[in-house]
Image (tube, helix red, strand yellow):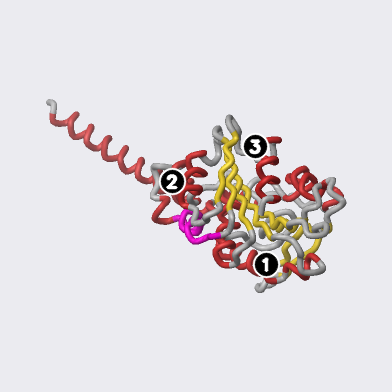
């Protein structure tokens, strides 16, 4: 009499296992097809504003045509005298307009600023990807004097914020700046994604990798890393790893105690940034 229930139980278990596998595969398929939107969510938003609308009238909007015909938005302000110029690479949340206060803080001190909106962000056309962003940022550096109106007299500083830390570091490898500032850097996007989704084979399949841990070893420019100890987006431990791996002989780390993911432009964070820049 026990044989029939056992057979039924086996069938139920088999169906559950098949259903679980199908759900797992389906979930991973959704993650795979949505990966661009997950890594670059600004591409799903309509976020265009002019500098004037964003409250930074001192900045001028310019456009850069990519080699494949896309149009990218740049916000530009030349430096005063021999002050440094920040080439700003933003994070994956929001738009250039969301950094208006930061841009005001920098330009009020006389620093130059060139902030690029990645493809799909802040009015820029095209689809973001690591390959496209890499090409676009290299083109920006090649054409920098044209956008500023002349070659800058002061130092050139790459400033990477969150997602932009990988962008800035990879660019620094190909086109070394006078200095590199990384706000809340990650070891790699694939490592960060694997940490968030440990039950999927992210490391083997994710094509948007941004491997900062590999690039930073070969970057010799003076480097400042700013990271909050309570960053819930990118762990503070990743910032410490990038500092350790940095190939620069003039590297510094500013730890923002109890700071979150957006603590770099607190009073302590700004003081560290300006002290680093003025000491170059």
- Look at 76% across and 48% down and name the residue there: 106
Front position among marks 3 and 2: 3
**Nearest to viewer (mark 1 / mark 2):** 1
* Mark 1 / mark 3, whichever is N-terminal: 1
Quarter of the picture holding the N terminus = top left
The quadrant holding residue 175 is bottom right
C-alpha gap between disc 1 and disc 2: 32 Å
Give the camera-side residue of 208 and 84: 84
Say which quarter of the image contains residue 77. Answer: bottom right
Residue drawn at point x = 66 percent, y = 60 percent = 119
- Residue denoted by label 2: 194
Q: Residues within 10 Å of mark 3 (few under 14, many from 20)?
A: many
| Residue 29 in the image: above or below residue 227 | below
Q: Position of residue 172 (x, y in %)?
A: 58, 62
Tell me the residue at 80%/69% (across/down).
150
Which residue corresponds to mark 1? 141
Q: Is residue 203 magenta?
A: no
Which element is circle 2 on? helix
Q: Secondary structure at mark 1?
A: helix
**Which residue sits at x=69%, y=60%?**
156
**Left or right of 123 on screen, residue 239:** left
Where in the figure is residue 170, as x and y percent of width and height?
55, 60
Element carrying mark 3: loop
Instruction: Point out residue 126 in the picture as x, y percentages from the top left corner.
Output: 66, 63
Specify whether residue 211 is painted magenta. Answer: yes
Q: Rounded to the nearest whole Å, what is the CA distance between mark 3 and mark 2?
A: 25 Å
| Residue receiving disc 3 | 263
3D distance between C-alphas at marks 1 and 3: 28 Å
Magenta residue span:
206-220
């Amino acid at each position: 009499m026990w044989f029939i229930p056992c057979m039924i139980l086996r069938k139920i278990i088999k169906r559950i296992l098949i259903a679980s596998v199908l759900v797992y595969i389906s979930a991973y398929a959704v993650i795979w097809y949505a990966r661009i939107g997950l890594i670059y969510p600004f591409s799903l938003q309509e976020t265009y504003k002019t500098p004037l609308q964003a409250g930074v009238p001192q900045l001028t909007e310019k456009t850069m045509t990519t080699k494949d015909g896309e149009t990218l938005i740049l916000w530009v302000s030349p430096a005063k005298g021999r002050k440094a110029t920040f080439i700003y690479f933003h994070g994956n949340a929001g738009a250039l307009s969301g950094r208006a206060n930061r841009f005001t803080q920098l330009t009020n001190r006389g620093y130059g600023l060139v902030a690029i909106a990645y493809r799909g962000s802040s009015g820029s056309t095209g689809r973001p990807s690591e390959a496209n962003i890499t090409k676009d940022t290299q083109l920006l550096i090649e054409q920098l004097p044209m956008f500023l109106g002349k070659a800058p007299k002061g130092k050139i500083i790459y400033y990477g914020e969150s997602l932009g830390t990988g962008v800035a570091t990879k660019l620094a490898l190909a086109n070394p700046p006078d200095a590199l500032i990384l706000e809340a850097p990650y070891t790699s996007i694939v490592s960060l994604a694997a940490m968030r989704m440990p039950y999927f084979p992210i490391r083997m399949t994710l094509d948007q990798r941004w491997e900062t841990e590999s690039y930073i070893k070969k970057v010799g420019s003076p480097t400042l890393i700013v990271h909050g100890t309570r960053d819930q987006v990118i762990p503070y431990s990743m910032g410490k790893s990038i500092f350790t791996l940095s190939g620069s002989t003039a590297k510094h780390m500013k730890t923002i105690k109890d700071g979150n993911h957006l603590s770099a432009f607190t009073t302590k964070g700004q003081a560290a940034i300006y002290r680093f820049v003025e000491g170059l």
